[in-house]
Image (cartoon, grey):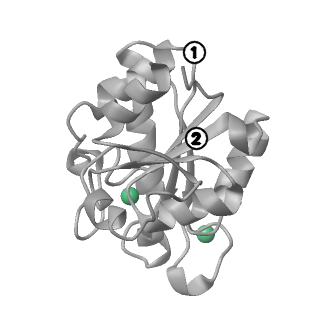
Amino acid sequence: MVVKRAVFLDRDGVVNKNRPDCIHNYHQFQFLPGAFDAIIRLCQNGLVPALITNQSCIGRGWVPESRIRHIHATLQQRLNQRGGGFMNVYYCPHNPKAGCRCRKPEALMLRKALSDYKAAPSEAVFVGDNVTDFLAAKNARVPFILVRTGYGEKSLKKIDPRDPGLLSVQEDLAGAVDFLLR
Ligand SMILES: [Mg+2]
Ligand SMILES: [Zn+2]
């Protein structure tokens, strides 16, 4: 059993389908197959997962921050309706040009989440599809699970499979949750 105290998830490409532009409303938020149930399973096992997501569409002026908050609030409602699930959300709203310290591959969001969860890096896990997720995890010393959904297949080619920061490679979020709860 690889159960961790703190399970952190990238959003786009892990929970929902990536879109070439960005997600403007909850109707455009399309869950990847099995992802919603996977989050519910984490919750049912006493875990409170957290999203760790770059949302530069706010800083670029494409989507108002209130809209992003509304999408996440709707997601919360749906989780709550389907089994009392709850999830925390950490997002970076900044434009990539702003040079902030939260936008992945920077580790500030993960460090903040570790502190909120009172978890050591080794007690946490980060599930992502992008090389920048992997680098953020490495920067925070949090073990990383790469999923093949989203940009996962592409990222796999850029990550050394023997890298000690790579805990596992899984098909998708459901596979990652199986791995964690096994
Ligand atoms: Mg992603
Ligand atoms: Zn930021």
Left/right placement of residue 32 relative to residue 116 reads: left
Residue 51: x and y in percent read 51, 45
Is residue 16 shown above or below 130?
A: above
Viewer-nearest of labels 2 and 1?
A: 2
Q: Is mark 1 within 8 Å of ligand 1?
A: no
Between 163 and 41, the one lying in front of the other is 163
Q: Ligand 2 quadrant?
A: bottom right
Residue at the disc numbered 2: 125
Q: Is residue 91 above or below residue 127?
A: below
* Residue at (65, 52) in percent of width and height: 110
Q: Position of residue 50 (x, y in %)?
A: 55, 39
Residue kind at label 1, given as amino acid type = Gly
Residue holding disc 1:
46
- The secondary element bearing badge 2 is classed as strand
Please, what secondary structure does the residue beneath circle 1 have? loop
Residue 180, given in percent of the width and then of the height, sits at 48, 27
Q: How many marks?
A: 2
In the depicted view, which residue is nearer to us: 151 or 28? 151
